[in-house]
Amino acid sequence: MQGRSQGANEAFKMGFSAYSEGNFEVAIKYFNTAISTDPNRSYFYYNRGMAYKASGNNGQALSDLQRSNDLKSSAEAHYQAGLIRYKNDDLVGAKTEFESAKLLREDLDNLNFYLGMIYFKDKNYEAALKCYEEFTSHVRTNADAFYYRGFCEAKVGKY
């Protein structure tokens, strides 16, 4: 069993190295090897999902991110799935993923901005405002976030 685990780890390391160098197709091949050797590690699927995302294959990326979350739910995998769904105008799916990510970890880059945008589009201005307030308390240079925060403040009567 240890030899099998070691082989999966070695393939994963090679895949991670290829991913870091921008060789996404090579990374996917190594991650495939790692997964076929040991299919029970969530981070194998997460990293292959990120390689698929980087190579433009969002369908496979979503599938792997979901499998990663099935094995061990992580804020990062939910967030990445949310970004893909948001980009594809699946706002209901994106909202679910972002809210799941937020339950696990609130400090993910731009999480509150995207969740605020979804609430804003749903005309849930109070929830959107809460997200924008949290986001703008950490970011000083996102004009869109400040614009939408101000708009929400006006909508809820908070000037």
Image (cartoon, rainbow, N blue to C red):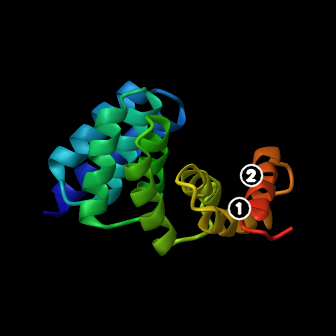
Q: Quadrant of residue 57?
A: top left
Q: Is residue 75 left or right of residue 131?
A: left
Q: Secondary structure at mark 2?
A: helix
Q: Quadrant of residue 39?
A: bottom left
Image quadrant where one finds the C terminus: bottom right
Say whether residue 100 is visible.
yes
Please state the horizontal and vertical placement of residue 109, each as a whole percent of the image.
64, 56
Residue sitting nearer the eye, 141 or 8: 141
In contact (CB < 8 Å): disc 1 and disc 2: yes
Give the farthest residue toward the left.
1
Position of the N terminus, as image quadrant, is bottom left
Neighbours of disc 2 within 10 Å: few (<14), some (14-19), many (20+): some
Element carrying mark 1: helix
* Amino acid type indicated by mark 1: Tyr
Q: State whether residue 39 is above or below residue 63.
A: below
Which residue is labeled 1 in the image? Answer: 132
Question: Which residue is more in the foreground, 31 or 48?
Answer: 48
Residue that badge 2 annotates: 148
Give the residue displayed 78% in from the left and 69% down from the top: 157
Say which of 66 and 47 sits in front.
Answer: 66
Image check: 5 left or right of 43? left
Quadrant in which residue 63 is drawn: top left
Point out residue 24 in the picture as x, y percentages from the top left corner. 42, 29
